[in-house]
Image (tube, helix red, strand yellow):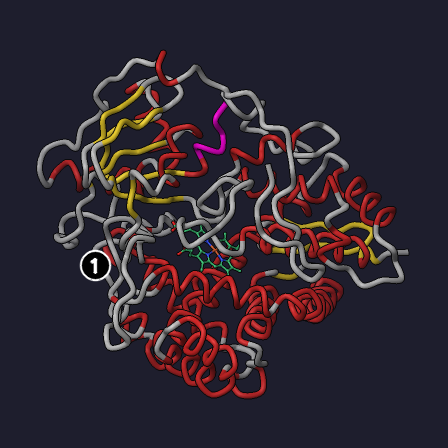
Amino acid sequence: MSTSLPRMSSSPPSSPSYTPLESPTPSLASLPVRQVPGSYGLPLIGPLWDRLDYFWFSGPESFLRKRMDKYKSSVFRTNIPPSFPFFIKTNPKMIAVLDVKAFKSLFDMEVVEKRDVLIGDYMPSTSFTGNMRVGVYLDPSEPKHSQACIISSSIYVKEFCTDILKRGSKQWVPELLTNLDTMWNTIEKEVTEKGSSSIFIPLLKAMFRFLTKAIVGADPLPSLGENAFVSFVLWIALQLLPTQSINILQPLEEIFLHSFSYPSFLVQPGYQKLYNFIKTQGQDVVQRGVSEFGLSEDEAIHNLLFVLGFNAFGGFSVFLPFLLGNLGNDQTGLQARLREEVRSKIDPTQPISFDSVSQLDLVQSFVYESLRFQPPVPAQFARARKDFVLYSHDAGFPIKKGELLFGYQPLAMRDAKVFDEPERFVADRFTEGKGGRGLLEYLYWSNGPQTGSPSSANKQCVAKDHVVFTACVIVADLFRRYDSFGGTVGSITAVEKAK
Ligand code: HEM
């Protein structure tokens, strides 16, 4: 099976063809149907206790693992924060779905809806996004409203995003390589002078400029300066704070970060500058949103800001430090194997392209495994559109219309019924050589299987292939530049230039 996206030389190849694996579990008819185990505890005390346990005493992963063990089920009822005492309008009662099979229900738009559930029952104020619900909060079924209405159909917004990526494809890799060049020069200089370099600032600067140029078609540096990315960082942070566990300064974190939401006016000046930049310098792309996708100018700009800042910049900022840190830290000889593949398969006289990295079996597998091992967006939510039976590997569970499902990727992606040695990072797990491509059906980081096709009928990330192949270009470029490098998540400690 392959996706229906057309193959274009400057676009990333769409999902590879593969032989589907045999289903890891018995047919649905043979599974028992039982009530979802678990409880929400006493009113007020239950949600509060679970909140403290989730963020502080256990941390999200161990909080969920403990309950999975206790109920002997990968599907169970639990409170997921934010919750009591100050988030009174947010309902923490959810059904956790933690195996690959159960998680798949989150992608079935027949039985679930995705209206306003990007980060759970809690939704940041629309004042962060120009007082409108941008595309990512819309369910595919929401109708197209008149121009005067602030709610526009998710179909139009999604098609607009797909179009942006398609049109920006020619600039994508060249802009990426130019900005990687600046980034590595900065890091290299600092490693030489100080013995190590933090990766965050150079990486965020590079990603911000590359993505803005590729998506908006304009260079932010001359008018916004090199630190404009900080506006996005703060804007994203304020929206996500009540849902994120940092767990470094408890109980202050519980008191100041998880107890209430911060108002958008704190980040409004920075957001407004970005808005003005897109309005004046991204005219071409904004006008396409207006004339070809029926959005108002304001809708086009706020949606562009969300896709650029939250989805693209936010996503890469979480994913890439892990990808590079994991590689820099490797003691298994993986760097040598990747280097060998890059240098033997890519013509050194030609610039790296999406086409050239599509020949790199191990590099692609390494990227897929990184997305499996540490999915950049750990939690996905969906609300039951109707009563239905949700199946895990072991049983069916009746779900009532309106109940909220909470899928936690880091656990689903370590499902031992699907992935051998799930707790181990196996760089060649997904290689064609090893017959691992069939596993892509179960790789869900993009809110859908890696073999799926993002469309206006689902909520899968439009950049599903761009993300994978962009990461492959980054790895290929790294091994053209260096023989080896050392580092951890967040810092580079050594680089050895290619001889
Ligand atoms: C490493 C980078 C990225 C990651 C980890 C990521 C992840 C995701 C995830 C998990 C979702 C689904 C959210 C949900 O509904 O639960 C999503 C949706 C989306 N992503 Fe990405 N993404 C990344 C990069 C990008 C880029 C580069 C773009 C566009 C330039 C993009 C555009 C979108 C859009 C428009 C949606 C909403 C789809 C819809 O509403 O149907 N993403 N992304």
Q: Measured from the top left, where is residue 169 in percent x and y?
A: 63, 66
Tag 1, which secondary structure?
A: loop
Q: Amino acid at mark 1?
A: Phe
The quadrant where residue 237 appears:
bottom left
Q: Is residue 445 left or right of residue 123?
A: right
Q: Measured from the top left, where is residue 372 in percent x and y?
A: 54, 38
Q: Is mark 1 within 8 Å of ligand 1?
A: no
Q: Nearer the viewer, residue 18 or 267?
A: 18
Q: Is residue 130 visible?
A: yes
Classify the position of the N terminus by image quarter.
Answer: top right
* Region in magenta: 411-416
Residue 346 is one of the magenta-drawn residues = no
Q: Is residue 64 left or right of residue 429?
A: left
Q: Residue at x 54, y 71 (%)?
A: 215
Task: List the residue tagged with mark 1.
Answer: 260
Q: Residue at x 83, y 58 (%)?
A: 497
Q: Is residue 189 left or right of residue 386?
A: right
User: Does the magenta stretch mainly form a helix, a strand or a loop?
Assistant: loop
Q: Residue at x 79, y 53 (%)?
A: 479
Q: Is residue 324 visible?
A: no
Instruction: Give the answer, above or below, for where 485 lies relative to 78.
Output: below
Q: Nearer the viewer, residue 232 or 304?
A: 304
